[in-house]
Amino acid sequence: MRRPPIAYLALAVAALLFGATFVVIKEAVASLPPLAFVGWRFLISALALLLLAWPRGSRIWKDGLLAGVLLFAGFALQTWGLSLTSASNSGLITGLYVVLTPLLAAAVTRRLPGAWTTIGAGVAIAGLALLTIDESFRLQSGDLMTVGCAVAFAGHIVVMSRVAYRHPVVPFAAVQLLFTAVAALAASAAFEGLPFPASSDLPALLLTGLAVSGGAFILQVWAQTVVGPARTAMLLALEPVFAVVFAAWLLSERLTARGWIGSILILGAIYVVLTTTKDNDEIPAAEAVSPAH
């Protein structure tokens, strides 16, 4: 069956928007604390999706709460980590969820991961070490938090593979985003004093809350129904590449020689896992599918 080129274009645009968010958030958390940013951002996106489709029935709320716990953990760690590390590192390390997802899926189903998945994980660990460990052999706290974010996103995808088929996409996404918003705002009230966004914060909140978490998510979901999860994953794996490009262009971030080698290893590991994962395994189509961006 011939697949419309517009679906591939939609996925490329989604990957570009996802990659650009790392730069946008990096700038935004300089004025708005990380948990507050997550809370207000996802409140905007949740309300937008709730206007499109209201969740009905108790099961969608129960499943949404389970998935939302991991979604909140992922975004809280990602945004907090991004305030302490570079946008380039954040984008590349977040992309490790692709490698971690089949490992977690194998653990849940109590089976050994495939050989190529194991090789990809080893290559990714080597790349992560080169990218994040400094000359004193210390892992920076922001990078470590982002590793935790990748683990949470991988866990979220595994949970979604078990429950998402029960529910329509938009209302189920809305439940998860709403829980993420409420949890982040509560945590911000406890640890940050729950600051309200200033007018200068609104462009970043609207861009990430509507254009990315809303618009790019819908683009991705539609395209995946046309081209399938494996091809979707391949194109959305461009996200960390776009993150590095935007960070270099807009923030003048530059990777060291070690960083470039580490980046290549991480991207190589992602490619290996995506191209060798069988259709009946857990294929991580993207954070957005989960949704997680």
Image: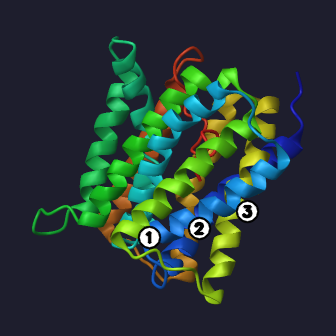
Tell me which residue sits at (50%, 45%) in the image: 71
Please report contact status of discs 2 and 3: CB closer than 8 Å, yes or no.
Answer: no
Q: Amino acid at mark 3?
A: Leu
Tell me which residue sits at (66%, 80%) in the image: 202
- Sequence-wise, the earlier of marks 1 and 2 is 1
Q: Is residue 55 left or right of residue 233?
A: right
Q: Is residue 253 left or right of residue 290?
A: left
- The residue nearer to you, when weighing 56 against 24, is 56
- Sequence-wise, the earlier of marks 1 and 3 is 1
- In the rendered image, which quarter is residue 284 located in? top right
Q: Amino acid at mark 1?
A: Pro
Asked if 201 appears above or below 79 in the picture, the reply is below
Mark carried by residue 69? none
- Callout 2: 10 Å neighbours few (<14), some, many (20+)? many
Q: Residue most toward the left?
A: 136
- The residue nearer to you, when weighing 245 against 11, is 11
* One can see residue 131 in this view: no
Nearer mark to the viewer, of 1 and 2: 2
The local secondary structure at tag 2 comes to helix
Tell me which residue sits at (63%, 60%) in the image: 43
- Callout 1: 10 Å neighbours few (<14), some, many (20+)? many
- The residue nearer to you, when weighing 27 against 236, is 27
Quadrant of the image for the N terminus? top right
